[in-house]
């Protein structure tokens, strides 16, 4: 525990920690005591108040901040279009990228680039993406925030496997048998190895799979990333993540900053070895068996280099106008509290949208608290600044280098552009508590044996934690021991309370990911729309997710 930098590192418990964890529920009481001593840190009850995870130090000399330009991520072009659908092809490839200036880093990228190309969609127009897997490992692609049919949702055991892989039974598949049979997470030597992956659990597509996205939803900032069972964290870390944008007429009528005044910022942290390769504490570097990370990092892997669109602490040249920033936290485990500092002090954000699109009206935010998986759509006004001024985007939850994210350099006087309208989404429907048909509780907790669980259970693809009716609203209450960013597939929600009080401004709008702070309680109203079928909710700290903090629900 380090009071000085406002962060909480669980590994600070030192060598006795695994023993402490083995005591199970006693952990929560013990930590409750420690945390209670932290007074002001937890009294503030912000959406992101501390971090859960451990820093993996880079071996390479870290690059200078603000030395490289912010990369513009290319937009994926359709190979074909017809009356109602756009068709895309996307190959997952091994490639290299210059991330640290002067070195080449091996990546796994959609289209061979990191971030992957941006998928641009139009509300009401479907898309079909044919994904080819040219990597040495299985993959599953999930459109995060997408209202997607179950067969295209990127379920962790619905895999695109490399050619020839389907006949192999890998250890994670054996482990899944053990887990499904209630024998825990370990593979034991005496366990009979099944002849083939159990078709009741695994769906294997050899070489490629076509994902179908209806895009019946409103305009929003989404993203896509890998979701392979047990290995999402290392595979996203290697580069399997990209942005997706849904546009619609309601939003276009607002005159928000567009074109080169609309920036997508994918923020994530990484660490590098001495040669400039991604460093990650996987137990098996081949990502086959066993899954998981070195015990020290099971709380989450934190990098010490902050990347925006794949560049370390980049700089973006801007004019004296209004800019729209679609900010995505694509980090495995790191939360941020973003602040903008200009020559005359803090520059506020005007928040216009959340994970699920526009807010009813804009609101001012002094800082943007952002846990893994969340998106914030904000407008920043540089019009009171002058050419030559600098505005730094910082992270108050970071330390020295991770306290910086990027810099805006004002280099020209321009027309500021129209102000943000006072009404953004006239048809926005605020859900009411009384509408909820069911109340359910999901408790996110570390269980004995170092397994991250939901309601005491590690993920079992055959088990269901809830069944909701299509078209209805339920109240879901999330409780937690550490920081857990809770994400629901398919169904979006509105936060109605945080720790017994009204939620803060950053919790506003339609969301699909919400951080639950240590010993926090977050209540949300979830609406089930779009499709029936099996979906999941899980922690979006990707190390927790890989170590079983997922659960199924169905929509019937
Ligand atoms: Cu962004 Cu199930 O994940
Ligand atoms: Cu978690």
Image (cartoon, rainbow, N blue to C red):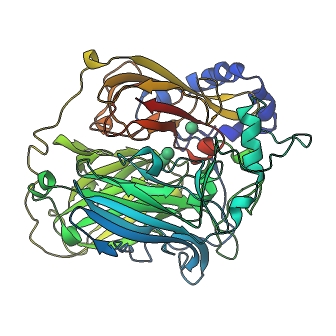
Residue furthest to the bottom: 102
Quadrant including the N terminus: top right
Give x and y (percent) for residue 129. 41, 64
334 vs 50: above or below: below
* Nearer to us in this view, 538 or 378: 538
Q: Residue at x 24, y 47 (%)?
A: 351
Give x and y (percent) for residue 93. 56, 73
322 vs 295: above or below: below
Q: Residue at x 35, y 64 (%)?
A: 119
286 vs 507: above or below: below
Q: Is residue 7 left or right of residue 499?
A: right
* Nearer to us in this view, 215 or 496: 215
Q: Is residue 524 left or right of residue 382?
A: right
Give x and y (percent) for residue 330. 47, 55
Q: Is residue 364 left or right of residue 164?
A: left
Q: Residue at x 49, y 66 (%)?
A: 131
* Nearer to us in this view, 317 or 496: 496
Residue 118 sits in quarter:
bottom left
- The answer to whether residue 65 shows anywhere in this view is no
Give x and y (percent) for residue 85. 27, 63
317 vs 468: above or below: below
Residue 530 sits in quarter:
top left
Q: Residue at x 75, y 31 (%)?
A: 181
């Amino acid at each position: 525990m380090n009071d000085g930098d406002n962060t909480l590192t669980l590994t600070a418990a030192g060598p006795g920690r695994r023993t402490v964890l083995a005591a199970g529920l006693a952990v929560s009481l013990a930590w409750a005591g420690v945390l209670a001593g932290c007074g002001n840190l937890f009294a503030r009850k912000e959406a992101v108040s501390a971090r859960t995870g451990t820093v993996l130090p880079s071996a390479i000399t870290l690059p200078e901040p603000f030395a490289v330009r912010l990369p513009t991520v290319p937009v994926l072009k359709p190979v074909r279009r017809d009356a109602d659908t756009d068709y895309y092809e996307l190959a997952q490839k091994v490639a290299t990228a210059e991330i640290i200036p002067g070195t080449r880093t091996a990546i796994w990228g959609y289209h061979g680039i990191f971030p992957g190309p941006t998928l641009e969609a139009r509300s009401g127009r479907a898309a079909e993406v044919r994904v080819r897997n040219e990597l040495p490992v299985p993959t599953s692609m999930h459109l995060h925030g997408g209202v997607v049919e179950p067969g295209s949702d990127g379920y962790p055991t619905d895999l695109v496997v490399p050619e020839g892989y389907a006949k192999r039974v890998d250890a994670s598949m054996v482990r899944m048998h053990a887990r499904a049979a209630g024998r825990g997470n370990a593979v034991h030597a005496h366990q009979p190895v099944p002849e083939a992956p159990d078709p009741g659990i695994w769906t294997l597509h050899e070489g490629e799979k076509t994902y179908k996205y209806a895009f019946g939803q409103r305009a929003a900032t989404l993203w896509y990333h890998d979701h392979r069972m047990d290995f999402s964290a290392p595979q996203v870390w290697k580069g399997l993540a990209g942005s997706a944008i849904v546009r619609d007429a309601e939003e276009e009528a607002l005159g928000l900053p567009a074109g080169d005044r609309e920036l997508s910022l994918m923020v994530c942290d990484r660490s590098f070895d001495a040669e400039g390769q991604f460093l990650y504490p996987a137990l098996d570097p081949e990502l086959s068996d066993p899954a998981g990370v070195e015990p020290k990092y099971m709380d989450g892997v934190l990098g010490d280099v902050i990347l925006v669109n794949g560049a370390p602490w980049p700089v973006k040249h801007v004019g004296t106008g209004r800019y729209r920033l679609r900010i995505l936290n694509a980090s495995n485990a790191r939360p941020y509290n973003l602040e903008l500092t200009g020559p005359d002090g803090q520059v506020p954000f005007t928040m216009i949208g959340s994970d699920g699109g526009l807010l009813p009206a804009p609101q001012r935010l002094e800082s943007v608290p952002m846990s893994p998986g969340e998106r914030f759509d904000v407008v920043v006004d540089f019009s009171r600044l002058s050419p030559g001024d600098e505005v730094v985007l910082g992270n108050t939850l970071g330390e020295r280098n991770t306290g910086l994210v990027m810099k805006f350099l004002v280099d020209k006087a321009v027309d500021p552009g129209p102000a943000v309208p006072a009404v953004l989404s006239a048809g926005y429907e605020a859900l009411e508590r009384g509408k909820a048909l069911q109340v359910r509780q999901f408790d996110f907790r570390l269980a004995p044996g170092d397994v991250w669980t939901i309601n005491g259970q590690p993920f079992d693809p055959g088990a269901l934690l809830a069944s909701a009716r299509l078209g209805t609203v339920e109240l879901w209450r999330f409780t937690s021991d550490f920081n857990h960013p809770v994400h629901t597939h398919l169904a979006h929600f509105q936060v109605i309370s945080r720790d017994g009080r009204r939620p803060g401004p950053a919790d506003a709008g339609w969301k699909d990911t919400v951080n639950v702070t240590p010993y926090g309680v977050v209540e949300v109203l979830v609406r089930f729309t779009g499709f029936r079928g099996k979906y999941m909710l899980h922690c979006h700290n990707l190390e927790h997710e890989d170590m079983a903090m997922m659960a199924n629900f169905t929509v019937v």
